[in-house]
Image (cartoon, helix red, strand yellow):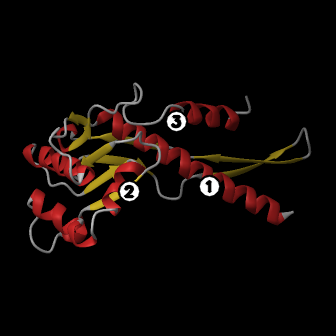
């Protein structure tokens, strides 16, 4: 019986991680400043669109350190010869020598096709206490058992919108670059946890 309870706990922790990541990405997308990639980007489009975003971050006084991209953009970057990938990107946005490993490109399937978010690591913040989700066990006297519950609290936001940018022209819905259904999934999971 302990194995069942432990596996339930593991599943709830995984569920919380997925929902909190979706929430943070939704907040990041909603708070990012739109930029328009150069329409002349026809070769290495994914890399050049990231460069345009990085230049927008630099123009706002930031130092680009990451990009979150849709799977199609990530695929186009991976199709670029290896010697041209990050070295090309670093040279294009003027990152100083030795900073190649500092700029990260992360694919995320929740972004619509063509979606790119580029930012300075100081431009967005996630507030979450260590050790979440918190597991609570309470005796259920009426049913003669133990109720298990998990609680997690997260806040996320773009604290400096000028240095977190998203490309325009690919907005999938009102929440920005995210595919439809993420906010509904968070709401459904919250209702399930409340027993509705």
Q: Position of residue 127 (x, y in %)?
A: 39, 47
Element carrying mark 3? helix
Residue to which mark 3 is pinned? 182
Q: CA distance from mark 3 to mark 1?
A: 18 Å
Earlier-in-chain disc, 3 versus 1: 1
Up/down of 129 relative to 81, above or below? above
Element carrying mark 2? helix
Q: Residue at x 34, y 42 (%)?
A: 114
Earlier-in-chain disc, 2 versus 3: 2
Up/down of 163 relative to 80, above or below? above
Residue 162 figure quarter: top left
Which marked residue is nearer to the observer: mark 3 or mark 1? Answer: 3
Q: Nearer the viewer, residue 110 or 142?
A: 110
Residue to which mark 1 is pinned? 13
Contact between labelled residues 3 and 2, with CB atoms less than 8 Å apart: no
Q: Residue at x 48, y 43 (%)?
A: 22
Residue 132 figure quarter: bottom right
Residue 81 figure quarter: bottom left
Q: In this image, 71 relative to 164: left or right?
A: right
Residue to which mark 2 is pinned? 75
């Amino acid at each position: 019986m302990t194995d069942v309870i432990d596996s339930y706990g593991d599943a709830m922790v995984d569920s919380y991680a997925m929902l909190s990541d979706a929430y943070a990405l939704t907040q990041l997308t909603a708070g990012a400043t739109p930029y328009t990639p150069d329409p002349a980007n026809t070769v290495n489009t994914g890399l050049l669109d990231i460069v345009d975003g990085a230049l927008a971050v630099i123009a706002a006084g930031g130092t680009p350190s990451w990009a979150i991209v849709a799977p199609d953009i990530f695929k186009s970057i991976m199709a670029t010869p290896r010697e041209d990938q990050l070295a090309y990107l670093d040279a294009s946005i003027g990152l100083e020598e030795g900073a190649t490993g500092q700029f990260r490109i992360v694919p995320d399937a929740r972004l619509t096709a063509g979606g790119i978010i580029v930012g300075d690591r100081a431009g967005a913040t996630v507030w979450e206490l260590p050790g979440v989700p918190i597991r609570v066990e309470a005796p259920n006297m009426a049913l003669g058992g133990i109720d298990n519950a998990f609680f997690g609290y997260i806040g996320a936001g773009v604290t400096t919108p000028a240095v977190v940018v998203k490309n325009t022209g690919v907005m999938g819905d009102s929440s920005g670059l995210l595919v439809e259904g993420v906010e509904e999934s968070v709401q459904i999971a919250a209702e399930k946890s409340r027993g509705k």
